[in-house]
Structure formats: structure tokens, C-alpha cells
Amino acid sequence: GAVVSQHPSWVICKSGTSVKIECRSLDFQATTMFWYRQFPKQSLMLMATSNEGSKATYEQGVEKDKFLINHASLTLSTLTVTSAHPEDSSFYICSATNRGGISGGLYNEQFFGPGTRLTVL
Amino acid sequence: GQSLEQPSEVTAVEGAIVQINCTYQTSGFYGLSWYQQHDGGAPTFLSYNALDGLEETGRFSSFLSRSDSYGYLLLQELQMKDSASYFCAVRDLRGYQKVTFGTGTKLQVIP
């Protein structure tokens, strides 16, 4: 249980185009989803926190107009990188959690998707 | 804000024991987690400490000292497949419990 999928797993696009990445919780309802970005040999940096039915909360320094997040249902969140540029090339990872606790208890473990590698030419 | 520091690289011999340290500064501490990430893959959850002390899960153990803002991950009976990056992470008590990751430690297990 507690599987999170991402699509696509990798994408190559031209500079100036927009790319949409989907994150789905397959067997649980994700009240909250998180979007991370990871550059090579670096840590995961949180970009935004997404709650179903409400606007995403962006971390400082992340442009909300460039990285559009939609959490339309309890099992799906999308990240759209608009007008992508080569510096946006990165590994984008989502995670999902259920505030009620998937396995019970106070600790709500985050379950990560397999990631999407974006390359902007 | 949150900041977590880890050694950047550690090398250990197969079958040995290795300890990966993590020191943190947080404005709202709810617990320390550890994640493993193989190259090109997603992080996978290893352990979680909310209280001081040692938590053991098979070959992996994790320790927390909240008074020292310090924790470590202990890997025993190292196997080649343990070669990966390891991240400590703190959970924010506020809001939606976002997780902030440490700088990461790349562990290389050698024969």
C-alpha cells in the first residue's frame, strides 16, 4: 500500500515550452502533496505544499507563476513548469501524505513518487 | 527556518558498521526522519525518531538527542546495495507538516 506514481518519468522539451507533471496517490487519499526539486548531487528542496481544493503554499524563492500547482482531487496533483528554460532542468519529485495517518498514529509518513527528470534544451 | 548538516561523503567496508551524523537547527521540531536514495531514484523512508533514544529496525538504527539537536543513522553489516545517499529530515510541527531535508551523505560501500 501507499504507492505514489509520477508521470512522465522523464521529459525533454525545448526552451520556452510548458511541461506538466502528474503525481498520483494510487491506494490512499492524499490530503497533502509536496513538490520537491533536486539538482545533481544536491538535497531535495521543497518547492511547494499542495492541499486538495486550496491554493498551494510556495517556499521562498519559488515563483508561483512559473511553477503552477493544481491539487484537484485527493489523488492527483499536477506541477506545470511554464516557459521552461535550461536552468529548470532538474529531478522533480512529489510526495503525498494523509493527515489522518495511513497506518494510524500521529506520524504521517510521506510517500514519494519515483520522480520526473526534466531536461530543457 | 530549518537547517540540517550532514557529512557529504562516507566510505565503509562491506560487513562493517557506519554511522551517519545529522545536526539540525529548527524553529519547530516534530521529529527526525531518515531516508535512503539510490542514484536516479526517489527517497525511501528508513526510520523516524520523535523522542530521545535509539530506534532499531533490522540492520538500521536511528538515534536522537533533542537536547543536543543531534541524531545519527547506524547501518550494520553493510552490504554493497547500501551504497546510496542518506538524508536526515525534520518535520515541521506547524501547518501541513512539511519536511526539510538535510544536505545528504553519500555512502560508498567497498569490498
Image (tube, coloured by chain):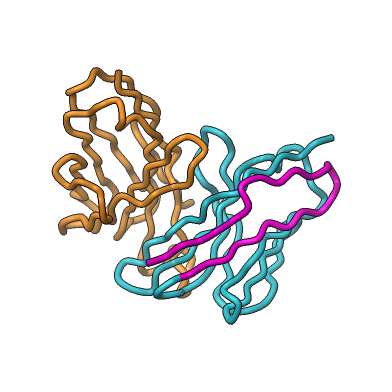
Chain colours: A orange, B cyan
**Would residue A102 be found to the left or right of residue A79 on screen?**
right
In the image, is residue A103 above or below residue A85?
below
Q: Quadrant of residue B29?
A: bottom left
On the image, the x and y values in percent for residue B31 come to 51, 71
Q: Nearest the camera: A116 or A119?
A: A119
Q: Residue at x 60, y 77 (%)?
A: B68
Q: Residue at x 76, y 37 (%)?
A: B80
Q: Residue at x 33, y 56 (%)?
A: A29
**Would residue A101 be found to the left or right of residue B11 on screen?**
left
Q: How many marks?
A: 0
Q: Residue furthest bottom?
A: B67
Magenta-drawn stretch, dominant element (helix, strand or loop): strand
Look at the image and say whether residue B24 sits in the magenta stretch: yes
On the image, the x and y values in percent for residue A68 come to 18, 43
**Would residue B72 be found to the left or right of residue A13 on screen?**
right
Q: Nearest the camera: B35 or B67?
A: B67
**Would residue B93 be found to the left or right of residue A43 on screen?**
left
Quarter in which the C terminus of chain A is drawn: top left
Q: Nearest the camera: A51 or B69?
A: B69
On the image, the x and y values in percent for residue B2 come to 42, 65
In the image, is residue A19 above or below residue B76?
above
Look at the image and say whether residue B89 sits in the magenta stretch: no
In the image, is residue B56 above or below residue A9?
below
Q: Residue at x 67, y 60 (%)?
A: B73
| Start-end of magenta stretch | B1-25
